[in-house]
Amino acid sequence: MIERLAALGLDDKEQRFYLSALQLGAASVADVAARAGVSRTNGYDLFERLEQRGLLSQIDTSKGVRQIVAEDPSVLIRDWERKRMMLNELVPELRSIYNGSSSRPRTRLYEGHEGIERALWETLECRSKVLYAILSMHELREVPGLQWMEGFIAERIRKRIELKVLRSPSRETDDIWPTEAFRDVRFAPKGVDLSMSMYINDDTVTYISSKAENYALIIESRELATLNLTFFNSIWGFSAPHAPS
């Protein structure tokens, strides 16, 4: 729990003061400070900081004494949702500046399971709201795994991002994700082995390796994206909505 609270931006004293307030219910700043192991002066400062984040508030008792209480912890979710909405608007604007700052291609290599997840998540920042993908289902089943991919798909649908996807029968495992909103899937003919997953969005190409090599490679290049999209559309033209029997 401590590590997760720290990830939300609460330092050690803020964590102890907040958890003490949760445990005590309505209590004075002095009582919460004593339980948290901080001075009364620090307690007032900690209360003000946590009040600004919506985690604590003040109430007046029947005796006219002011006490503090912890808000329902779900306020953390509301705060995260508010920040996510703000970032959804801000990140595309920042990326437009970032992408336009130089004509040279940019390359990023993300290694490991978490790196692959990060690279996939970045594809959902596409400005065009259209993703072109080649998905090797056997490899995606292993890394990042079906459960993670289901959350990824849900976020894509929430953002109303269209997916045009090519898959090859040689890389299928079973009938996973048979129905999915904002998706148009085609299957390459037999003999066309699409052995690696790839996403194309805007001027970016993202390659996702198998578990054996365990990396994601992102290349921001208008020329490369255009070339890969040409290859994608060529295969798309002779692919079918159903896997060949």
Image (tube, rainbow, N blue to C red):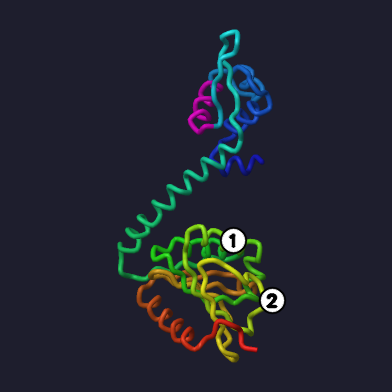
Q: Residue beneath label 1, please? A: 114
Residue 79 lies left or right of residue 4; in this view the side is left
Q: CA distance from mark 1 to mark 2?
A: 25 Å
The N terminus sits in image quarter: top right
Helix, strand or loop under label 2: loop
Using the image as rendered, state which of residue 104 and residue 233 is in the foreground: 233
Using the image as rendered, state which of residue 239 and residue 100 is in the foreground: 239
Residue projecting furthest to the top: 63
Looking at the rendered structure, the kind of residue marked 2 is Asp
Report the disc number at residue 174: 2
> Is 148 located above or below residue 239 in the figure?
above
The C terminus sits in image quarter: bottom right
Using the image as rendered, state which of residue 164 and residue 217 is in the foreground: 164
Residue at x 59% of width, y 77% of height: 136
> Is 170 located above or below residue 12 in the figure?
below
Looking at the rendered structure, the kind of residue marked 1 is Glu
Q: Position of residue 17 (x, y in %)?
A: 61, 28
Residue 61 found in image quarter? top right
* Of the image marks 1 and 2, the number of the one nearer the N terminus: 1
Residue at x 65% of width, y 79% of height: 172
Specify start and end residues of the magenta stretch as a single range.
Answer: 42-54
Q: Position of residue 71 (x, y in %)?
A: 59, 30
Helix, strand or loop under label 1: helix
Classed neighbour count for the residue bearing mark 1: other residues with Cα under 10 Å, few (<14), some (14–19), many (≥20): some
Q: Position of residue 126 (x, y in %)?
A: 42, 64
Residue 200 lies left or right of residue 242; in this view the side is left
